[in-house]
Every structure is written in structure tokens, then in C-alpha cells.
Amino acid sequence: MKKHFLLFLLLNSLFAAGCSTIATDEQEITEQSLLHERRSRDAVLTDKHIENEAYDELKDDDDIAYQSHIRVTAFNGMVLVTGEAPNEEIRKKIISTIQVIPGVKLIHNNLAIAAPSDAGSRANDALITDTIRIAFNQIRTIPGFDPSMVKVIAENGIVYLMGLVHRDEGAVVVNLTRLQPGVKQIVTVFEYLD
């Protein structure tokens, strides 16, 4: 029964990811996709450009591409870099590559010096992320709160939370995240509106 539930959650996340993606083409971003977005349309486009440019640049470097596991998440010009790099030299190279991308205001460097995580660890992180997103959909105590306003990134059981939030929203989100199974640590990368 537990295996079926886990399979259901993984499949659900794949379908949800396909439905909630904001298009990177300027003409494809609609008012509907920006309905619950607190960033401006230009900020959303800049963030997508930062992520795409970072991945394009990093995959072209063989040392980085074959020895590292990197996730780049941009939100309002703040860039969260998570994953693993084999040594400090490559870690610095990754960050310096991202720093020069137009629109990057600040980098939160959370790259670990370690071998790339395995498929099992990444699947566990996907499960943690999905569990948290499902829990966020149950929040009813904050008027006007939409779970899509918070980005959830899980890496080796560490959960990073990004978004433009009010302090009361951030507190509820952190407390709810803390209750989810598999969460080892929570790192907030919020920009507070108040």
C-alpha cells in the first residue's frame, strides 16, 4: 500500500510540474500565469533567463557537467545554488559563472563539496518537495495565500523556501514544512513584504 501511495505522489508531481510551468517565451506568459505571482512580469522573465543561461553555461563546461550535480533557482534576481561539486575549485567556478549573468542580484551558495547525489536521494527529495507542496495547499488560515507564491527546493533532505512573502505567511510555511517527514533542515531565502 505504501509503495502505491509513493508511486501516486511521484506521478502526481510529474503531472503537476507539467501543468504549472511558466513559459519562458515572453508572449506565452499570460495574465492567468501571473494571477498569484507577486513578481512583475519582467522579474519572472528575468528569473527564467537567469536559470536557463546558468544551465546553458554550466553544461558547456565538461569539468562541471560530469563531476557535479547543480540546481539553480532564481527568484526576483536572488539565485539559490544547491547540489554538489567535487572540490572547492569547481564550486568557485560554478558560482563565478552564475555571478556574471545579467539580472543576478545576489547568490545564495549552498553547494556542498561532495560527490553528486544518487538517484535514490534525488527521488527522496522529489517526494519531500511534493509532500510539502501538498501540505501548502491545505493552508486556510492566511487570507489570500496561494501556495504557488513559495518555491520549494529539497536537496539531500534540506528544504529551501523562496518567495516574496509577508512574515506571517513565512512563519506558517516554515512551521508546516517542519512537520513534514524527511525534512532534516529548513533554510529560508524569503524576501519579506513587511
Image (tube, grey):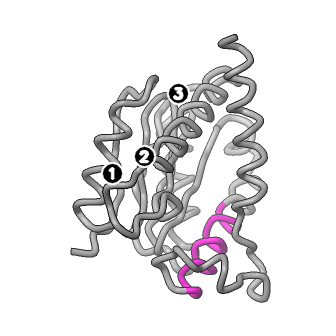
Which residue bears the numbered disc 1? Answer: 188
Tell me what residue is drawn at x 49 percent, y 67 percent.
Answer: 75
For the stretch drawn in magenta, the main secondary structure is helix
Question: Mark 1 touching mark 2, by CB under 8 A?
Answer: yes
Res 178 → quadrant: top left
Q: Earlier in the sequence, mark 3 or mark 1?
A: 3
Provide the secondary structure element on which disc 2 rests: strand
Tell me what residue is drawn at x 64 percent, y 38 percent.
Answer: 69
- Magenta residues, start to end: 41-54
- Measured as percent of width and height from the top left, residue 82 is found at 51, 45
Which residue bears the numbered disc 3? Answer: 114
- Measured as percent of width and height from the top left, residue 120 is found at 67, 20
Three-letter code for the amino acid on which mark 1 is drawn: Thr
Res 56 → quadrant: bottom right
Q: Residues within 10 Å of mark 1 (few under 14, many from 20)?
A: some
- Measured as percent of width and height from the top left, residue 68 is found at 64, 38
Nearer the viewer's eye, disc 2 or disc 3? Answer: 2
Tell me what residue is drawn at x 70 percent, y 11 percent.
Answer: 1
- Indicate whether 131 appears above or below 20: above
Three-letter code for the amino acid on which mark 3 is drawn: Ala
Provide the secondary structure element on which disc 1 rests: strand
Per the image, is 11 magenta? no
Is 141 or 23 nearer to us in this picture?
Answer: 141
Tell me what residue is drawn at x 36 percent, y 56 percent.
Answer: 189
- The numbered disc on residue 132 is none
Three-letter code for the amino acid on which mark 2 is drawn: Tyr
Q: Residues within 10 Å of mark 2 (few under 14, many from 20)?
A: many
- Indicate whether 36 appears above or below 131: below
Is 189 or 174 nearer to us in this picture?
Answer: 174
Which residue bears the numbered disc 2? Answer: 160
Q: Earlier in the sequence, mark 2 or mark 3?
A: 3
Q: How many marks?
A: 3
